[in-house]
Image: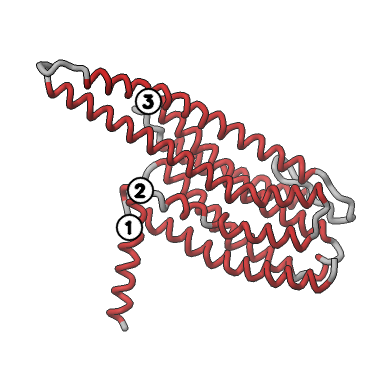
Amino acid sequence: MSLNLHICSAILCSLILCLTIALGLAGNLAVFLVFKRSWRLRTWENAFHLNIAAINLFMCVLQAPAILFLLWDDNVTSNVYQAMCTFSQAGLLGLLGILVSHSQISILRCIKVYNPCHMPKKRLIICALIIPWIAGLIITVQMYVTETGILFVDTCSYTHLVKDTSVFYTMIIVLLTSCTVLVMSYGMIFVKLRKERRVISSTKVFTIAQPLFLNHVNKDCTVQSMTFGTATIRHLVVSSATLLVTFLATALPPVITLIMFQRMELSYSFTAVIYCATYIAYFLSPLIYSFRNREFKRTLWNMLRRSNKVHVWNS
């Protein structure tokens, strides 16, 4: 790897990371402020999205600057694999919390679809929100104490330059575990919603075929229930699709990039630029998902208008 190529990639990655830190702080803090202003957005599902935003803020404040300093370290040119291994550790620690949170969202959505009247207990939600942080803390402490990795964190060889295939196998474990939980949960949701849709369609046909002398109140209630059921199905399907697309677009590129580096002998400069570029969308994932909500957009717009009025008044 030539020195000029390394310097150019380091400059480009530094610009991307600086932009990432600014966008990550602004985007994830906006999610917190909007959810704090609007009481309608304070639901159990949004609590997990706030947890993802908190994880992203933690990564933005601690992880991105560490990678920024690593890019300009003189030892990178002599030990490329150590640098990419550090990248993978940083990415996996953040990805662990994101994957656990997304899996919890899919499981709770599945419970909500199969038991609409069942409300999850507050203690259960609090424990579920703490689990990603506890797992990340245990892995981080164990990694730095023993200089080896457990579970989802790969083992880095700092004393020699021999490549370690644990990065590849750890990525596979993370992908298989998360995809299994997500596919099973959303598959069960899809099966349930298809059955509900058939019931709603048959109810609609039955309602239209009713004689005119029947009670109009019962007919109106049936139509209202049918409309509510259709809206619920549409909301869950669109929300689930948006969640999966956002997750795939933000979480998988760093993993695929590191797998390509591990198995295909790609250059350090190429993989570093791609990996740093994915951080922009990775930090903005809660904001991207939240913009689907009309209440979120309205509250954010009102906050921006008020701040603009205050700024004009002070000037």
Element under label 2? helix
Q: Residues within 10 Å of mark 1 (few under 14, many from 20)?
A: some
Residue type, label 1: Thr
On the image, the x and y values in percent for residue 91 come to: 66, 52
Select label 1 or label 3 by which is in front. 3
Q: Is residue 196 above or below residue 21?
A: above
On the image, the x and y values in percent for residue 192 come to: 44, 24
Residue type, label 2: Leu
Q: Residues within 10 Å of mark 2 (few under 14, many from 20)?
A: some
Decide which of 313, 139 is in the foreground and name it. 313
Q: Residues within 10 Å of mark 3 (few under 14, many from 20)?
A: some
| 296 sits to left or right of 146 | left
On the image, the x and y values in percent for residue 4 come to: 80, 74
Residue at 67% over, 64% down: 66
Element under label 3? helix
Pointer 1 residue:
299
CA–CA distance in space, label 1 to label 2? 10 Å
Select label 2 or label 3 by which is in front. 3
Quarter where residue 221 is shown:
top left
Pointer 3 residue:
197
Task: Of the two numbered discs 1 and 3 on the same chain, state the one appearing first in sequence.
Answer: 3
Task: Of the two numbered discs 1 and 2 on the same chain, state the one appearing first in sequence.
Answer: 2
Decide which of 31, 228 is in the foreground and name it. 228
Residue at 47% over, 53% down: 288
Q: Are marks 1 and 2 in contact (CB under 8 Å)?
A: yes
Q: Is residue 89 above or below residue 131?
A: below
CA–CA distance in space, label 1 to label 3? 33 Å
Decide which of 30, 10 is in the foreground and name it. 10
Pointer 2 residue:
41
Give residue 54's mark: none
| 145 sits to left or right of 194 | right
Residue type, label 3: Arg
